[in-house]
DNA sequence: TCGTTGCGAGAGCAATGCTCTCTTAAAAGA
DNA sequence: TCTTTTAAGAGAGCATTGCTCTCGCAACGA
């Protein structure tokens, strides 16, 4: 229900515009098409040059437009970036959703590992986009509210896996795992609004695994492993199995 | 010994220049001083504006110089950035070293937690510098060899803690922890060149904790926790204790 | 058919990084 | 001590960026 009521946010911006315009005038249809084309070119530029290499003027040039015309479609460079960020979150979220869906529902460990590999594969395939999402925030850029809904799309999938495993009684964390402090209760309750009801200690452990996944991928992508960890596929797989073990998933 | 032989790399670039120049001519002394001043102003600008907001011209303006004069000291903006990166790694490494040294040598868990908090505190105090080190790499920028020596300074401290704990027999990882694959042996050997001799499985678990630490800090700093995890100090502390537990450190 | 609205073109502004040349001053060599 | 070499700052200039403004033209709605 929560998913359903906020499903609109899952669409890409340009798709929304497109959907609205399909029944409108020709002018609006071409406007939506051009908006999409601008975003596509920008995404290609982002993929090759990186975020700071993304130039409105270069996009305009490639469109055969003069630079000022772009501003009819995106009020600023930041706004274009926001669109790309939302699209990126959605693309990653979709990859994660597909990976989860392709794994047997009862195989919670398999689903977790599938999600991990989906995140990493997507990140390796789209390094600059990943950097835009999970790297340093671009300066002076404050993530608008629009992004958060798309941003948690992968987290929702992950939360569902943890919740499923917990309610199936498949979670047996090692007894050395410390309980979270009482101060964590508020945050756990907030997290529970996104991912379904699991006790505080499971939320805490889930958080550790989740940050561990992205910590690893970021280290790998941002060059922290250079010269040290070279055989990365098995190392990553093992690290994610380790997180699974600590979470309490069966191996 | 390893530390001693490569101790030179632990100094900041500007410090090296300064040290060399103290016995040289007046011209070289003032050059070193100006180089230092440029780097200082740049660092202040980095702290307030972020990496992409760092402008050579603005630095020159603040120095009372014309912009082209800066190029007598730093051949390019990237070169200035490299200096700031090295300084950043050294500052973080120093903070980590101090935190470790201030904790009883036998209290391995305390040393690990001290290091974790040192990293996080430094990151929170210098967010833009942290982003420069562990966020997305700046576009077109390839980390020169100079940086790697400074970059591993914190890792060396961490490795020593793990090694100390292991050789003290203080490491009792949970039995659910999976063994690393045989393919990990090469990488483990490479890691052992930096941090002293510990078996492959300990290296693997150490890697999980280390990436988990930076994953958490990056999530917190780059806004991934916004709206969800607000009471961050206890949550962080618990997460790091969790990593400690999985590593096998006593709680 | 006519007024309104949207859109592209073009000029322009204030920045940026970086490259030249020129002049002056300091250091090194005779 | 005088001359030559070297270093450093000033200034102009180039190509580039994001963004704003005005001006027409063309499609749209009444």
Image (spheres, coloured by chain):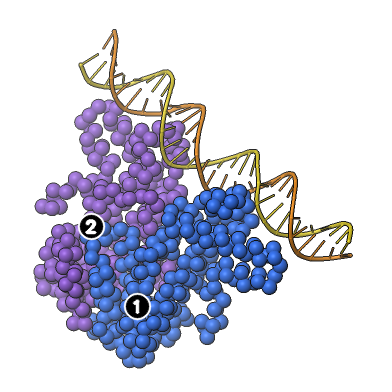
Chain colours: A purple, B blue, C orange, D yellow
In the displayed structure, would residue B48 be above or below residue A241? above
Residue B243 at what x, y percent from top left?
28, 76
Residue A182 at what x, y percent from top left?
16, 72
* Chain of the residue under label 1: B
In the displayed structure, would residue A187 be above or below residue D19? below
Q: Which residue is mark 1?
A: B114
In the displayed structure, would residue A85 be above or below residue B201? above
Q: How far is mark 1 from mark 2, CA to CA?
A: 27 Å
Residue B92 at what x, y percent from top left?
43, 70
Quadrant location, the C terminus of chain A: bottom left
Q: Which residue is mark 2?
A: B227
* Tally of numbered discs: 2
* Chain of the residue under label 2: B
Residue A7 seen from this side: yes
Circle nearer the N terminus (1, 2)? 1
Residue A208 seen from this side: no
Q: Quadrant of residue B116?
A: bottom left
Q: Residues within 10 Å of mark 1 (few under 14, many from 20)?
A: many
- The residue that appears at 11% across and 64% down in the rendered structure is A197
- The residue that appears at 64% across and 62% down in the rendered structure is B31
- The residue that appears at 59% across and 61% down in the rendered structure is B35
Between D29 and B73, the one lying in front of the other is B73
In the displayed structure, would residue C3 be above or below residue A121? above
- The residue that appears at 61% across and 68% down in the rendered structure is B17
Q: Secondary structure at mark 2?
A: loop
Numbered mark located on residue B42 in the image: none
Residue D28 at what x, y percent from top left?
26, 22
Q: Residues within 10 Å of mark 2 (few under 14, many from 20)?
A: few
């Amino acid at each position: 229900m929560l998913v359903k009521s906020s499903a609109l946010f899952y669409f890409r911006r340009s798709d929304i515009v497109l959907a609205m315009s399909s029944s409108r005038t020709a002018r609006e249809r071409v406007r939506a098409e051009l908006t999409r084309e601008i975003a596509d070119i920008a995404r290609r530029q982002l993929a090759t040059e990186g975020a700071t290499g993304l130039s409105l003027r270069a996009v305009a040039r490639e469109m055969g437009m003069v630079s000022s015309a772009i501003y009819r479609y995106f009020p600023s460079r930041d706004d274009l970036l926001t669109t790309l960020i939302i699209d990126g979150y959605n693309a990653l979220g979709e990859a994660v959703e597909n990976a989860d869906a392709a794994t047997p529902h009862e195989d919670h460990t398999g689903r977790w590992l599938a999600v991990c590999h989906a995140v990493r594969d997507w990140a390796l395939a789209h390094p600059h986009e990943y950097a835009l999402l999970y790297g340093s925030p671009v300066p002076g850029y404050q993530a608008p509210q629009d992004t958060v809904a798309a941003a948690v799309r992968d987290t929702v999938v992950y939360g569902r896996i943890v919740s499923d495993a917990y309610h199936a009684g498949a979670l047996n964390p090692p007894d050395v795992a410390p309980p979270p402090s009482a101060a964590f209760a508020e945050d756990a309750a907030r997290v529970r609004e996104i991912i379904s009801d699991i006790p505080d200690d499971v939320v805490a452990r889930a958080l550790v695994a989740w940050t561990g996944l992205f910590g690893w991928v970021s280290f790998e992508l941002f060059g922290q492993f250079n010269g040290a960890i070279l055989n990365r596929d098995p190392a990553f797989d093992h690290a994610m199995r380790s997180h699974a073990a600590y979470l309490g998933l069966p191996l």
